[in-house]
Image (cartoon, helix red, strand yellow):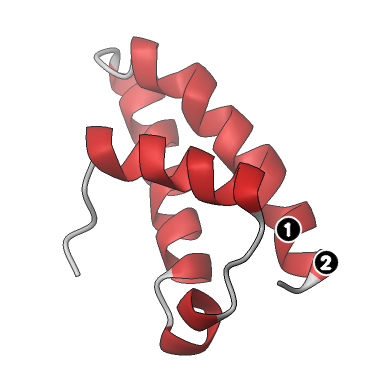
Amino acid sequence: MDKELVSRLEPLLRQAQLLLPVSEQATSASDLQNVYETICELVLDEQVISSLWHEPILLQLNWLFKLKPPLR
């Protein structure tokens, strides 16, 4: 997995973990949706999916997508 992608995903996934419990508030829900859409744009691509071999990122994506499955 590309180091640049990992460095972009790590803070986004941390932010999603912080926002998810408070996502019922309007501003937090909007922030969470923005973070979630960015994560999906980064990882839901055939080339990226085939190269996802970073276990911490995969575990966090698994957690996130169980709570909020992607629409794709």
Q: Which residue in the rendered view is the most extreme toward the left?
A: 71
Q: Which mark is residue 31?
A: none
- Occupied quadrant, residue 54: bottom right
Q: Taking 4 as reference, is 31 above or below it? A: above
- In the figure, 4 relative to 28: above or below? below
Question: Looking at this view, is 6 or 36 the one in front?
Answer: 6
Q: Secondary structure at mark 2?
A: helix
Task: Name which residue lies at 58% across and 30% down.
Answer: 15
Q: Please, is residue 58 above or below residue 51 in the view?
A: above
Cα gap from disc 2 to disc 1, whole angstroms: 5 Å
Q: Amino acid at mark 1?
A: Val
Q: Position of residue 19 (x, y in %)?
A: 45, 21
Which of 10/50 is in front? 50
Q: Residues within 10 Å of mark 1 (few under 14, many from 20)?
A: some
In the drawing, does residue 25 fall left or right of residue 31? left
State the SS at label 1.
helix
Where is mark 1, residue-wise?
A: 6
The residue located at (49%, 57%) in the rendering is 38
Kind of residue at badge 2: Lys
Mark 2–mark 1 CB contact (< 8 Å): yes
Q: Residue at x 69, y 39 (%)?
A: 11
Which residue is at 50% across, 24% downward?
17
The extreme right residue here reads 3
Tell me residue 60's x, y (percent): 51, 39
- Quarter of the image with the N terminus is bottom right
Residue 3's tag is 2
> Which quadrant of the view contains residue 72?
bottom left
